[in-house]
């Protein structure tokens, strides 16, 4: 038997080693993570409306949360879409300074969002241990604040990486995926604001 | 009742004819018998399906079994697969139809068991406590309201509506021979009705895990004729008469001067706490400690002195009484008919 | 692989030695203890040579979360709420502040329950078994944060009246002067 | 034509270059840095089997306490802990980790024809988090802090007022740990199945096991968050006094049950679908033919995935829900029987038109057919509302779910073990011992759990630590306890068989059963780089339909751990992805996360302060360590070229 049997070979050495957008495996993992967190949000909102059916007046014996802070927080989250989109657009080009400015702007807006969230929590007009309404409102906002903080830290970490020489290849794709997750945080922020501020007033 | 459900089945029959009035298969009321009918019907369908499918697998296995040990080549059987796809298709349709039939029957039975309510049923409020049942016969006039525990008297043949509520955790009110179980949820008051046709004593048990003594949280339903029931109810309304002999007076004083007075009520005396069961007519009950002990002086004494040995973890504290005090107390409690 | 398993086993054994008392379900307090200690020694000092301070068995109840939670249930069921409310006081003095008229030691609270006090505190001797009195005493002390956090009871399934004992800050007992402290 | 072994003589030195690139560190600390899926998969299987044995010991103690009426061998408090930890261990620490994570993490990358699982460090992290969660529950049991409110811990019994101390907190935190682990592995397995399949393995040619692992992962992604929400709510109620379940201030006890069972029922399908995956694989191999009805089976698996989310209220029929919703859920619960029935009929047709070799794995699959069928049919009885009012929370339900869980998951698990252990250890298991184990377990199982049907019909409720003699349940309970002896003997025979075969068993060779999927193309035990030559696939059973000179994939770099990423639908090669190598950071992150979670039981600030080390270890984990000068700017994608 001849020592090396010639086998037809499907040569893939020419393929790229990093892909952007939907083809990236980290993008898929990010999508699955968003499905998990989205289910948690949906369930807390579902509990909120379920408990609402259980009590006669809503909010039971509390003032509804002050609308002002809700609108400010919502506005800031909408503004934050601009730096996120910018960072995502410039990521494939690999241009270091643009990426750094995009991430810096995103981190800045995130800090503002956190500060506003602090005021928002202070003006909910209810403490979490008063009744079931207050507990679910705090649970919903607490869950979102957790995401806001982790997303802020992630943006800062990628910002630091962008100052090192390893900012190439898949790290560029990470910048784009980080912006995807930021869109998720903004969507859930708007949804939570609507549930907390909207249902107690308009529905 | 369809006759064939009485046919004694091979394995199940031997065990099903097990005596005992605490069984799903020995109904004593319309609801339980409807459900028992449904049980036997679905059981027969399931039994036939099981036999057919098992025979199918045995036939398939035996038909193509080879004891060859080596790696046989991979075979293809186009014709066989075509025939098989017809067989599988028809099997699936039969399954869907059978399931639909089961759905329809269970809906019908559900309607019958949930059933029509009656104009003036006997209303009983059952409140679950940690490890005993508070039973109240509510009445618009307060003094006509009967409060008792663990033993529920109902007239035979009349509709009875049970209003459920719980004072602490989730319990589940279930007398297998009468009707299905219904959970007692704190914060919910739901109602379900039952009816008993044959007089007798039917045992029930808590069916939702509720803590340390979930195992000893039984109750019993005594079904009696109309007049016996109203006579029992009249007796329950009367407060306890004052004791006359020396020993029963001493018994009552022991009751009023020890921990008993902190938890129990005896109408007609100063003891009025509603933490524990109402003892005004304890002697009229057949069992004590939520159907755990028979209502005999010996059992009563053992229970009073050290309830934690019999039902460890329950709320009643041990009462180390002097022998003569204990004897007097027991005699006094026996007079509370 | 074998040494890793042995290391894990030793850690487990060490942990199980500290079988914490917090979770001890003492379902049957030994009955004989509940007759003798009718009169508990409130102060450890006495003139003369042999001091007769018999340490009250408070430790057994103050370390068991089960006992303190039983104490909380009994506090409500035996109607201490009637006069002391949920610790804020009413007819009876408040219990959740740091002002202890008759002493804040478990023995003192136990003696108050058993003997009763002037101005309306009833004596529950022979009415409440002693182990339950110790449990109620442990709960009363937990109201002002004198018990460790993981033993003190959490919220109850009733209306929200005050933060749970577990989240009450520690208040060093003061005002053990014998006379009721004037409101500052 | 005999099965063609892909005989390829390696080019010079490829094997040792790959071995060096994919080598995993050895030694004590090396054990914690290992991120290869075979190592993590075997660890999941071994650890969850140990917890299966521990859970079995608790079951034996429970059966001993129930052997006769008023038997006070074990008090109520310890008994409550026993059945709670038994239930939680068997569901959360054994069934899901073994069937989904254990088999999934080990078999899926092999079957996809790739060199490691996607996100290997997340996979290793999931294993450590699972072990910490398991230890948390069992250390709690040793310290008398074992959970004691049942494996689903209904509120208000598990709430702050009726479970003093930290018992329910330990249980709730264990839930969070095991769910984070399952979610991590679900992300890894979904990405591996969708993106790392060998070229040519289109969706239509994927083995059924991969379909089922994909559907199970999606179910995990939508079901596990529900139990994490409800266990966190319970934990917050107990530690920071939130009022979710306090009926006096607007809370609701049924909210707990809805949220828990919305997870609960998909959970049992997360356990059952991997079992049917093993059955479909083994039946095809030992009937020596392709599985009958590939498309119907895959469709019914996907249908089970969807229907699993629509039946959860059949656990709550007794709570007095309105009649209308109860009948909807009866219909849904009956409908979910159809997909399983379709799979049963397809298996029967496969055997009917195949050549049955009743080897050991197949014997267990026949055991599965007989036992699971009883469980499934008693499930049909439970689906009807009026009948459920009578048998809910009785020993009839205990018998039902043991028939579907032991029958539906344990029998296929043992079949799968006898099938894949030759691949894992490289040695065949002893056939005679395997049969003894089967018959002992089969007889003991039926003796114990078939009698429980009658106990349930005679009104014996669940979770009772004893019963009064007047109930006349003593004889049946004695019979049930005797069955446990046979089952224990069977399990001991299996353990002896495993260790004996690991030491002196017959060498298995790459494909002892002549199976058709890709994992049988690797030598057994497989090296850390799995495939010397990355395979391409030609049909549904890769090895059975391989041409003599089936093309292989070339051009994947051998000096860095690189795998080929193909697109989802028709698995065309898209790009080459570099996988992160072994690292200690996942283990350190698991420790940091554990400290934060356990600390949060004792004080709410635990999450805040504990989060700092978690962030630090996460940064350590994800910080890019460049070791391959990949090109600075990615050049446009080239087509994969065929060279002769």
Image (cartoon, helix red, strand yellow):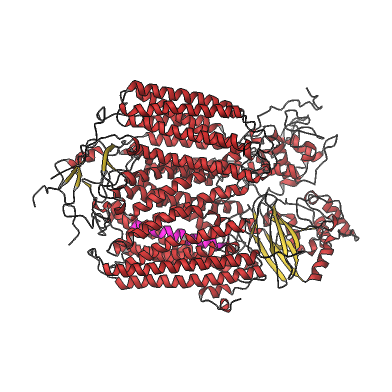
Residue D153 visible? The answer is no
Q: Is the C terminus of chain A in the top left, top right, bottom left or bottom right quadrant? A: top right
Q: Along the line of sight, which residue is nearer the eye, B134 or A157?
A: A157
The image position of residue B126, as x and y in percent, is 72, 57
In this picture, residue C64 sits left or right of residue D129? right
Residue at (86% x, 60% y) in the render: B238
Q: Along the line of sight, which residue is nearer the eye, B277 or B96?
A: B96
Residue B266, quarter of picture: bottom right
In terms of secondary structure, what is the magenta stretch mainly?
Answer: helix
The image position of residue B254, as x and y in percent, is 83, 53
In this picture, residue B139 sits left or right of residue D573? right
Residue C48, quarter of picture: top right
Residue at (45% x, 53% y) in the render: D306
In this picture, residue B124 sits left or right of residue A18? right
Residue A130, quarter of picture: top right
Image height of D266 relative to D289, above or below = above
Q: Along the line of sight, which residue is nearer the eye, A81 or D341?
A: A81
The image position of residue C154, as x and y in percent, is 64, 39
Image height of C89 relative to D425, above or below = above
Q: Which residues are magenta?
A: D392-418
């Amino acid at each position: 038997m001849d020592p090396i049997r010639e086998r037809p070979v499907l040569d893939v050495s020419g393929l790229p080693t990093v892909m952007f957008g939907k083809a990236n495996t980290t993008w898929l993992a990010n999508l699955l993570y968003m499905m998990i967190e989205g289910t948690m949000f949906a369930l807390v909102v579902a509990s909120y409306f379920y408990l609402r059916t259980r009590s006669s007046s809503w909010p039971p014996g509390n003032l509804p949360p002050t609308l002002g802070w809700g609108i400010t927080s919502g506005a800031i989250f909408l503004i934050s879409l601009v730096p996120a989109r910018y960072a995502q657009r410039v990521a494939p080009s690999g241009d270091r300074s643009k990426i750094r400015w995009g991430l810096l702007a995103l981190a800045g807006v995130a800090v503002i969002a956190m500060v506003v969230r602090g005021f928002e929590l202070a003006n909910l007009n209810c403490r979490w241990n008063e009744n079931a309404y207050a507990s679910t409102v705090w649970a919903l906002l607490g869950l979102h604040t957790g995401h806001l903080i982790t997303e802020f830290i992630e943006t800062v970490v990628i910002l630091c990486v962008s100052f090192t020489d390893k900012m190439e290849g898949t790290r560029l794709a990470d910048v784009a995926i980080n912006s995807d997750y930021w869109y998720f945080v903004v969507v859930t922020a708007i949804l939570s604001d609507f549930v907390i501020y909207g249902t107690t007033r308009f529905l | 009742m369809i006759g064939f459900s009485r046919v004694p089945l091979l394995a199940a029959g031997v065990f099903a004819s097990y005596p005992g009035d605490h069984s799903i298969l020995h109904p004593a009321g319309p609801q339980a018998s409807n459900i028992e009918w449904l049980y036997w019907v679905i059981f027969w369908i399931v039994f036939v399906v099981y036999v057919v499918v098992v025979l199918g697998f045995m036939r398939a296995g035996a038909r193509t079994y080879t004891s060859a040990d080596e790696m046989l080549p991979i075979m293809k059987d186009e014709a066989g697969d075509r025939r098989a796809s017809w067989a599988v298709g028809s099997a699936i349709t039969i399954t869907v139809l059978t399931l639909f039939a089961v759905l329809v029957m269970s809906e019908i039975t559900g309607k019958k068991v949930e059933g029509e309510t009656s104009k003036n049923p006997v209303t009983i409020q059952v409140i679950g406590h940690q490890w005993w049942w508070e039973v109240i016969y509510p009445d618009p006039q307060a003094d006509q309201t009967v409060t008792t525990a663990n033993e529920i008297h109902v007239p035979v043949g009349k509709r009875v509506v049970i209003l459920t509520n719980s004072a602490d955790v989730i319990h589940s009110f279930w007398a297998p021979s009468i009707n299905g179980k219904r959970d007692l949820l704190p914060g919910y008051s739901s109602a379900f009705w039952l009816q008993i046709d044959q007089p007798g004593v039917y045992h029930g048990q808590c069916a939702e895990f509720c803590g340390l003594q979930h195992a000893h949280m039984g109750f019993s339903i005594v079904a009696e004729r109309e007049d016996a029931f109203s006579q029992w109810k009249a007796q329950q309304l009367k407060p306890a008469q004052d004791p006359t002999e020396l020993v029963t007076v001493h018994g009552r004083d022991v009751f009023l001067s020890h921990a008993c007075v902190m938890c129990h009520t005896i109408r007609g005396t100063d003891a009025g706490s509603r933490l524990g069961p109402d003892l005004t007519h304890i002697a009229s009950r057949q069992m004590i400690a939520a159907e755990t002990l028979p209502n005999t002086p010996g059992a009563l004494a053992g229970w009073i002195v050290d309830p934690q040995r019999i039902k460890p973890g329950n709320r009643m504290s041990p009462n180390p009484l002097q022998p003569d005090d204990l004897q007097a107390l027991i005699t006094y409690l026996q007079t509370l008919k | 692989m074998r040494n890793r398993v042995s290391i894990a086993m030793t850690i487990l054994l060490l942990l199980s030695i500290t079988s914490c008392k917090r979770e001890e379900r003492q379902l049957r307090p030994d009955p004989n203890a509940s007759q003798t200690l009718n009169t508990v020694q409130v102060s450890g000092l006495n003139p003369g040579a042999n001091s007769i301070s018999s340490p009250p068995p408070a430790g057994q109840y103050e370390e068991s979360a089960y006992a303190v939670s039983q104490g909380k249930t009994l506090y409500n069921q035996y109607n201490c709420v009637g006069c002391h409310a949920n610790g804020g006081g009413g007819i009876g003095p408040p219990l959740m502040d740091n002002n202890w008229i008759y002493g804040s030691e478990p023995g003192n609270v136990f003696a108050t329950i058993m003997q009763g006090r002037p101005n309306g505190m009833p004596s529950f001797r022979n009415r409440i078994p002693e182990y339950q009195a110790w449990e109620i005493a442990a709960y009363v002390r937990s109201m002002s944060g004198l018990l460790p956090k993981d033993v003190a009871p959490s919220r109850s399934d009733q209306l929200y009246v005050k933060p749970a004992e577990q989240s009450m800050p520690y208040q060093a007992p003061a005002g053990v002067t014998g006379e009721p402290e004037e409101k500052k | 034509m005999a099965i063609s072994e892909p005989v390829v003589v390696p080019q010079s030195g490829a094997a040792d270059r790959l071995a060096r690139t994919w080598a995993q560190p050895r030694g004590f600390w090396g054990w914690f840095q290992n991120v290869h899926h075979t190592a993590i998969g075997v660890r999941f299987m071994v650890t969850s089997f140990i917890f299966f044995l521990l859970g079995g010991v608790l079951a034996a103690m429970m059966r001993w306490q129930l052997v006769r009426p008023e038997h006070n061998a074990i008090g109520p408090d310890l008994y409550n802990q026993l059945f709670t930890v038994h239930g939680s261990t068997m569901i959360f620490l054994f069934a899901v980790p073994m069937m989904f994570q254990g088999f999934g993490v080990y078999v899926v990358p092999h079957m996809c024809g790739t060199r490691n699982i996607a996100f290997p460090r997340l996979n290793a992290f999931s294993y450590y988090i699972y072990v910490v969660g398991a230890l948390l529950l069992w250390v709690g049991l040793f310290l008398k802090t074992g959970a004691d409110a049942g494996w689903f811990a209904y509120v208000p019994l598990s709430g702050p007022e009726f479970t003093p101390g930290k018992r329910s907190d330990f249980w709730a935190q264990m839930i969070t740990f095991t769910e984070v682990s399952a979610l991590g592995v679900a992300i890894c397995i979904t990405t591996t199945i969708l993106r790392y399949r060998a070229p040519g393995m289109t969706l239509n040619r994927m083995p059924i096991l991969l379909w089922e692992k994909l559907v199970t992962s999606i179910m995990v992604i939508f079901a596990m968050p529900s139990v994490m929400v409800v266990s966190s709510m319970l934990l917050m109620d107990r530690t920071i006094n939130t009022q979710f379940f306090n009926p006096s201030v607007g809370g609701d006890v049924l909210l707990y049950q809805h949220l828990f069972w919305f997870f609960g029922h998909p959970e049992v399908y997360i356990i059952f679908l991997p079992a049917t995956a093993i059955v479909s694989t083994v039946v095809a191999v030992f009937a020596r033919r392709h599985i009958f009805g590939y498309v119907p089976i895959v469709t019914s698996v996907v249908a089970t995935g969807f229907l699993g989310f629509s039946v959860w209220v059949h656990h709550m029929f007794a709570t007095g829900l309105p009649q209308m919703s109860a009948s909807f859920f009866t219909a849904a619960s009956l409908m979910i029987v159809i997909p399983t029935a379709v799979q049963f009929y397809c298996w029967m047709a496969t055997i009917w038109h195949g050549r049955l070799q009743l080897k050991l794995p197949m014997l267990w699959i026949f055991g599965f057919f007989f036992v699971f069928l009883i469980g499934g049919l008693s499930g049909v009885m439970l689906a009807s509302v009026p009948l459920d009012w009578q048998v809910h929370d009785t020993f009839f339900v205990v018998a039902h779910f043991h028939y579907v869980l032991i029958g539906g998951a344990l029998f296929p698990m043992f079949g799968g073990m006898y099938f894949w252990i030759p691949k894992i250890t490289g040695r065949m298991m002893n056939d005679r011992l395997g049969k003894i184990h089967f018959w002992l377990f089969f007889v003991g199982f039926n003796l114990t759990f078939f009698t429980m049907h009658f106990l349930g019909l005679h009104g014996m409720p669940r979770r009772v630590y004893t019963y009064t003699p007047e109930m006349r349940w003593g004889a049946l309970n004695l019979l049930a306890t005797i069955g446990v002896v046979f089952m224990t003997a069977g399990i001991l025979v299996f353990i002896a068989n495993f260790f004996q075969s690991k030491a002196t068993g017959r060498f298995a060779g790459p494909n002892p059963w002549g199976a058709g999927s890709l994992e049988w193309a690797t030598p057994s035990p497989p090296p850390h780089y799995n495939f010397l030559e990355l395979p391409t696939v030609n049909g549904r059973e890769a090895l059975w339909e391989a041409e003599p000179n089936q093309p292989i994939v070339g051009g994947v770099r051998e000096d860095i751990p690189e795998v080929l990423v193909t697109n989802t639908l028709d698995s065309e090669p898209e790009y080459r992805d570099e996988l992160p190598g072994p690292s200690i950071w996942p283990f350190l992150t698991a420790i940091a996360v554990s400290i934060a979670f356990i600390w949060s039981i004792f004080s709410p600030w635990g999450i805040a302060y504990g989060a700092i080390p978690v962030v630090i270890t996460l940064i350590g984990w994800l910080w890019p360590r460049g070791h391959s000068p990949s090109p600075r700017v990615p050049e446009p994608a080239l087509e994969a070229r065929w060279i002769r």
